Amino acid sequence: MKTHELRERLRTFPRFPLLRDATPLHPLENLSGELGVDLRVKRDDLTGLAAGGNKTRKLEYLIGRAQAEGADTVLTAGWYHSNHALQTAAAAARAGLECILYLKAGDPRKGSLFLDALCGAQVRLFDVPGSGALGPEMERGAEALRREGRKPYVIPVGGSDPVGSLGYVEGALEMREQCDETGWEPDLVVCPTSSGGTHAGLLAGIPALFPRTRVLGIGVGDDPGEVREKVGHLRDALGELLSLPPLDDRTLDEAFCFDYGFGAYGTLAGPVMDLIREVGSREGFFLDPVYTGKAFYGLLDRIRRGIVPLASRVLFLHTGGLSGLFQYEEEVHRHLAGTD
Ligand SMILES: Cc1ncc(COP(=O)(O)O)c(C=O)c1O
């Protein structure tokens, strides 16, 4: 499909601009040399909204829809380290909307939770095992606002509904334009996958624009069956919204790897924390322990084991998470100092 055709289809959806410029796509020269592949990183940790991250692209469409529906308040939910919640707070601030966050309780003096408050969000903390339990709380909150005559817009955990996932079809378009400029084209695009919207958006945009490129989402500890099902549904919905051909089951099955979850979502893993330091000291950017650290660890392991062939051109999507790294700075520091 031609870039402009897909762009025209995306233009039919309301969008609130949050990203002013394309994020960098640059080679990782030190790691590429050692690994024998051409590894590049798409720096969506540098989107320019709050501490950056993949949610910026989703929120362009989610806030656009909220505005089109006349909303005055946005609500969303997640863990205390949630980059999504922070980005939502920042996007709402830019759009002049109120923001209420329903979060699993954590230390409000640190990381994302500290920054949420600086973006003016109302933060409601709940002592729950995971973010799943927060959906009903958020719905009750939205209902109470409606009774007061307000107009709430509820954004699901991770911003992963079909509207939010449009952001990564847009992300694929940006990659296409950057690759056209440089003449470089990836054989493989890799991202972390959790609530699924980023992965689903790429699975819609990449096959349309890069017919020979594979997409691989690396799970970060969520239930594999649930992630697979969610990404599949979101990809189907995007296909309908944008009139794209469906993905066959084999392509979809091959688009997941769940070997690097290290137990469960949110569990910190020693090898991932070691890699965060290695990448910082060899390539000068930061991974986070919940998403990008696990996914990048998985990618490097697959390259070292030959699952990704030598000389492959690989694009790793950096989805952000810096504020999450600061949520866990003590744990990471203790591990690296050998005192855990
Ligand atoms: C930093 C970061 N990376 C990756 C993801 C996963 O993206 P998705 O939820 O679209 O699967 C998230 C989701 O919250 C995130 O905050």
Image (tube, rainbow, N blue to C red):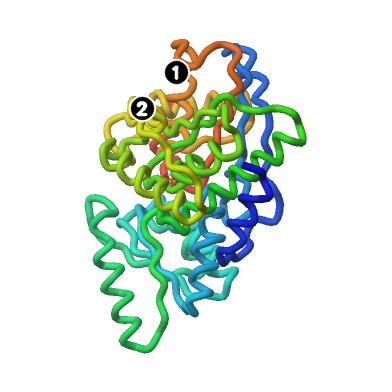
Separation of marks 1 and 2 at Cα, in angstroms:
9 Å
Residue 321 visible in rendering: no
Mark positioned earlier in the residue sequence (1 or 2): 2
Question: How many dots with numbers?
Answer: 2
Task: Judge whether 6 appears above or below 281 on screen.
Answer: below
Give the image location of residue 122, x and y in percent. Answer: 42, 71
Does the numbered disc 2 mark a residue whose Cβ is under 8 Å from ligand 1?
Answer: no
- The image shows residue 231, relative to residue 314, as above or below, that is below
The residue identified by callout 2 is 260
- Given residues 218 and 241, the one toward you in this image is 241
Query: What's the amino acid at mark 2?
Result: Tyr
Mark 1 Cβ inside 8 Å of ligand 1: no
x, y (%) of residue 137? 26, 67
Displayed quadrant of residue 314: top right
Q: Does dot 2 land on a helix, a strand or a loop?
A: loop
Where ligand 1 lies, by quadrant?
top left
Q: Residue at x 66, y 39 (%)?
A: 176
Compared across the picture, whether 316 is left or right of 33 comes to: left
Q: Secondary structure at mark 1?
A: helix
Contact, mark 1 vs mark 2 (Cβ under 8 Å): yes
Crowd rating for badge 2 (residues with CA inside 10 Å; few <14, some 14–19, many 20+): many
Front-lying residue, 212 or 64: 212
Q: Which residue is mark 1?
A: 301
What is the x, y in percent for residue 256?
38, 31
Residue drawn at x 33%, y 46% is 230
Position of the N terminus, as image quadrant, is top right
Q: Residue 87: x and y, percent?
A: 51, 57
Q: Is residue 261 above or below residue 79?
A: above
Looking at the image, which is closer to me, 57 or 334?
57
- Residue type pointed to by label 1: Asp
Residue 59 in view, yes or no:
yes
